[in-house]
Image: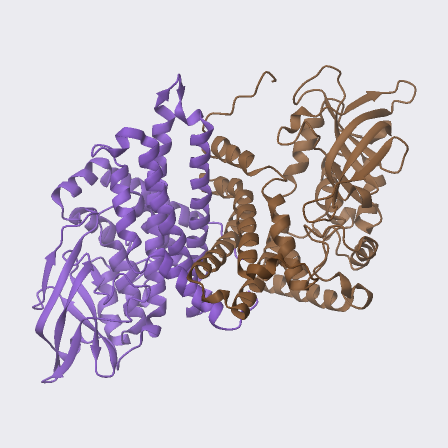
């Protein structure tokens, strides 16, 4: 039996993250983020990335990282999710770094991962199809060799944390398959921030028109397939699921606090069984999704790519449904004030809807699982 | 617990089962589980003694009482291997998992000497006398009466227990009864051990929606519990009865999940064969079932951790609601995958198994604390929400 008990160190990491974010990313700061519509808190980012090493968790020690497991990373991402913290944490630590680890050359990894680990840069990935369960199956970006370098063309309509990122990793179609390019800040590409429903996460468009890159901007050796990036896609999904579980915890806590105070018919409404049971059912679903996320994170190092991806998809499917329902129930159980701008549940509803479409909606992940279960002989599992 | 030792234990269990769950015991594979609990009773009793001979009854008990003193992780490994091999439902479960640990904790030395060896040896079987017609979810409402006979000090029991699993195959019953006249609620209760084979006890089977009869009504009309067969003292019944429920730590649930996985596997196989696998809606439900089962596995592992955090507590409290609803949903999914074939009763063993699943899983959300009670517990003990009003009783 795998030991799923968190270690004392893991608990401490989780508690410290929660405490820091309660202080630095509380409801007031969240409102400022929403008003400023930047989706990014540069000062907080410096603290967590440079001083606390949140992006260094899973990076190997030889690359300047802490060499910890996905469990530790999931715990801090979960804490960030609770506060809807405007940080490029998921993009950098759960998407860009794992993609580099999966498909970049050792030379490229040795050049970039230490900068991520040290918190010197924020990074992101311009997934070709941000809404797909296989976000590398198609990409609007093409690359052609030119004068010893490459010319890149294409418009990626939505890139998470595009403005905040100092480095954008761009999967592009080359004649022989996919190649991965590094766009450092000022490389000549254009990013344009988009106004979004979920104002707590930054999204930008990335445009490249005949963008000339030197040969060393290419990070892979000789092309890769989406399959080769499976562990990176799994990590990115697991990270989103952890974030969703954290956000669900927080919005459920808002609900519990409200129903514990609101008095009608001479009783707090938390004493009505109709209210209690709805809260309790959400708790079961939260325990389910959280167990799936932390279980998949703990199992990650021992699992093959197929299993990693299946478990990450399961975590996403559960967490996407969970967060949406937790936010929806929060508005409902808050009654009239739940519909107001002043109360916070709507921020979580907007996050719930926006994040549910990233890297594949719940039903797409379920379809991918079904394809695996029903296409070939079912193994004893 | 090192992985090496666990692996060695698993190998030992596998080897023993492949040698012993064979020959005349072969028909027992996969039989006798929930919904099929009255299958092949005599052979299953013999199987208990076979298990005992191999030292595989009560492996979690201390060595003093013939156990192996296995850790939680080792017991889980044993349960998983047992389920993987198709080991039959355990008639000895109530003795091994519930009354045995209770007697080890609360019994007198004489009670321990009298009862534990026979449970360990697979020669005496137990059933649980808790629920009554008026005491289901509200267990503290038991009305079965126990009156002390002055001449002997024995206790004479009058009343009725219901939903008593496998009473017709058992030798002893433990009974929660009211020893203090006029008492209500959790006070004035007594925990008694009674031999079933005596005048004054009548066992009537209850036919279930699946057609079988695993459980029974047990009627007491002056049945006798000997003076030395009180566990704890008169008045302490509630404390003993609830402590007993705490011994069920869910170790067997990881074995149960092996059976769930096999059921899901069968559903997938049939879906591929009959074309149901082409239905987008059924594909979603099958995948959701897979995700839920994976999560259940991790949830059980978390629930078995000694994790005092809020999350740990909620994982434990939510576990029963989760698995029972998952299983009931799987039952319906199985029938939907079968389509019109699900309605045909022709003895086809795969269909029989799924039909049993469909019907018996209706009980999962009722026994051992209904879903509604589970949600109350989660809300009250897990989330600190106000308690339900309790009528006029303390």
- Above-or-below relation of A182 to A255: below
Q: Position of residue B333 (x, y in %)?
A: 53, 55
Q: Position of residue B7 (x, y in %)?
A: 62, 65
Judge left or right: residue B343 versus residue B387. Answer: right
Q: Position of residue A146 (x, y in %)?
A: 11, 83
- Above-or-below relation of B60 to A158: above
Q: Position of residue A155 (x, y in %)?
A: 14, 67
Q: Which chain is purple?
A: A
Please state, as top left, top right, bottom left or bottom right, where the N terminus of chain B lies in the image.
Answer: bottom right
Return the residue found at the far right: B151
- Above-or-below relation of A12 to A336: below
Rendered colour, chain B: brown
Judge left or right: residue A195 versus residue A74. Answer: left
In the figure, residue A190 lies in which quadrant?
bottom left
Q: Is residue A58 visible in the rendered structure shown here?
A: no
In the figure, residue B372 lies in which quadrant?
top right
**Residue at coordinates 32% horizontally, 54% vertically from top-left?**
A240
**Residue at coordinates 73% horizontally, 65% vertically from top-left?**
B17
Q: Is residue B132 visible in the rendered structure shown here?
A: yes
**Residue at coordinates 70% horizontally, 16% vertically from top-left?**
B183
Asked whether B333 or A119 is in front, the reply is B333
**Residue at coordinates 44% horizontally, 25% vertically from top-left?**
A271
Question: How does the figure colour the protein chain or chains?
Answer: by chain
């Amino acid at each position: 039996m795998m030991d799923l008990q968190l270690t004392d160190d893991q608990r401490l990491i989780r508690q410290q993250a929660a405490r820091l974010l309660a202080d630095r990313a509380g409801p007031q700061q969240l409102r400022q983020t929403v008003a400023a519509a930047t989706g990014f808190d540069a000062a907080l980012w410096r603290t967590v990335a440079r001083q606390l090493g949140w992006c260094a968790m899973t990076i190997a020690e030889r690359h300047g990282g802490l060499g910890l497991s996905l469990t530790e990373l999931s715990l801090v991402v979960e804490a960030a999710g609770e506060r809807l913290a405007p940080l490029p944490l998921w993009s950098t630590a759960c998407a860009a770094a794992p993609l580099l680890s999966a498909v970049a050359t050792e030379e490229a990894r040795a050049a970039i991962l230490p900068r991520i680990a040290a918190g010197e840069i924020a990074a992101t990935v311009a997934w070709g199809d941000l809404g797909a369960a296989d976000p590398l199956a198609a990409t609007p970006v093409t690359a052609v060799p030119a004068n010893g370098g490459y010319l890149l063309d294409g418009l990626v309509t939505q890139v998470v944390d595009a403005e905040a990122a100092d480095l954008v990793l761009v999967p592009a179609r080359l004649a022989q398959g996919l190649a991965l390019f590094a766009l450092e800040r000022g490389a000549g590409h254009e990013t344009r921030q988009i106004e979004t429903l979920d104002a707590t996460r930054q999204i930008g468009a990335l445009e490249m028109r005949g963008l000339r890159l030197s040969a060393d901007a290419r990070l892979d050796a000789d092309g890769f397939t989406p399959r080769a990036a499976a562990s990176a896609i799994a990590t990115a999904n697991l990270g989103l699921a952890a974030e969703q579980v954290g956000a669900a915890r927080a919005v459920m806590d808002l609900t519990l606090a409200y129903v514990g105070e609101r008095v009608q018919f001479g009783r707090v409404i938390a004493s009505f069984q109709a209210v209690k049971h709805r809260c309790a059912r959400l708790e079961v679903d939260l325990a389910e999704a959280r167990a799936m996320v932390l279980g998949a994170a703990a199992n990650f190092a021992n699992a093959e790519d197929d299993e990693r991806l299946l478990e990450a998809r399961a975590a996403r499917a559960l967490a996407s449904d969970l967060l949406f329902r937790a936010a929806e129930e929060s508005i409902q159980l808050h009654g009239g004030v739940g519909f107001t701008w002043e109360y916070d549940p709507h921020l979580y509803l907007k996050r719930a809807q926006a994040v549910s479409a990233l890297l594949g909606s719940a039903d797409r992940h379920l379809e991918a699982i079904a394809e695996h279960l029903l296409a070939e002989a079912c193994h004893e599992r | 617990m090192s992985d090496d030792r666990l692996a060695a234990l698993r190998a030992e269990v596998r080897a023993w089962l492949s040698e012993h769950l064979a020959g005349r015991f072969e028909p027992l594979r996969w039989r006798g589980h929930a919904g099929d609990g009255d299958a092949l009773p005599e052979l299953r009793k013999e199987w208990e003694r076979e298990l005992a001979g191999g030292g595989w009854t009560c492996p979690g008990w201390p060595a003093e009482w013939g156990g192996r003193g296995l850790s939680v992780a080792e017991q889980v490994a044993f349960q998983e291997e047992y389920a993987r091999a198709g080991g039959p439902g355990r008639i000895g479960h109530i003795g091994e998992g519930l009354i045995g640990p209770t007697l080890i904790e609360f019994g007198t030395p004489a009670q321990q000497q009298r009862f534990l060896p026979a449970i360990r040896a697979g020669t005496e079987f137990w059933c649980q006398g808790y629920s009554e017609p008026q005491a289901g979810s509200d267990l503290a409402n038991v009305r079965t009466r126990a009156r002390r006979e002055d001449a002997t000090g024995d206790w004479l029991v009058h009343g009725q227990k219901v939903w008593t699993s496998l009473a017709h195959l058992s030798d002893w019953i433990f009974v929660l009864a009211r020893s203090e006249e006029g008492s209500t609620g959790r006070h004035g209760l007594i925990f008694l051990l009674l031999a079933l084979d005596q005048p004054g006890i009548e066992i009537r089977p209850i036919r279930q929606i699946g057609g079988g009869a695993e459980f029974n009504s047990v009627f007491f009309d002056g049945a006798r519990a000997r003076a030395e067969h009180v566990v704890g003292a008169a008045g302490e019944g509630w404390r003993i009865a609830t402590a007993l429920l705490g011994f069920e730590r869910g170790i067997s649930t990881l074995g149960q999940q092996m059976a769930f996985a096999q059921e899901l596997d069968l559903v997938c196989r049939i879906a591929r064969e009959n074309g149901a696998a082409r239905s987008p809606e059924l594909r979603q439900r099958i995948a959701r079932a897979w995700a839920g089962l994976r999560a259940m596995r991790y949830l059980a592992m978390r629930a078995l951790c000694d994790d005092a955090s809020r999350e740990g507590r909620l994982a434990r409290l939510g576990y029963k609601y989760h698995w029972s609803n998952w299983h009931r949903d799987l039952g319906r999914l199985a029938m939907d995958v079968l389509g019109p074939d699900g309605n045909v009763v022709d003895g086809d063993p795969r269909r029989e198994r799924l039909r049993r699943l469909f019907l018996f899983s209706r009980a999962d959300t009722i026994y051992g604390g209904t879903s509604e009670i589970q949600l109350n517990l989660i809300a009250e003990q897990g989330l600190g929400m106000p308690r339900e009003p309790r009528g006029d009783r303390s």
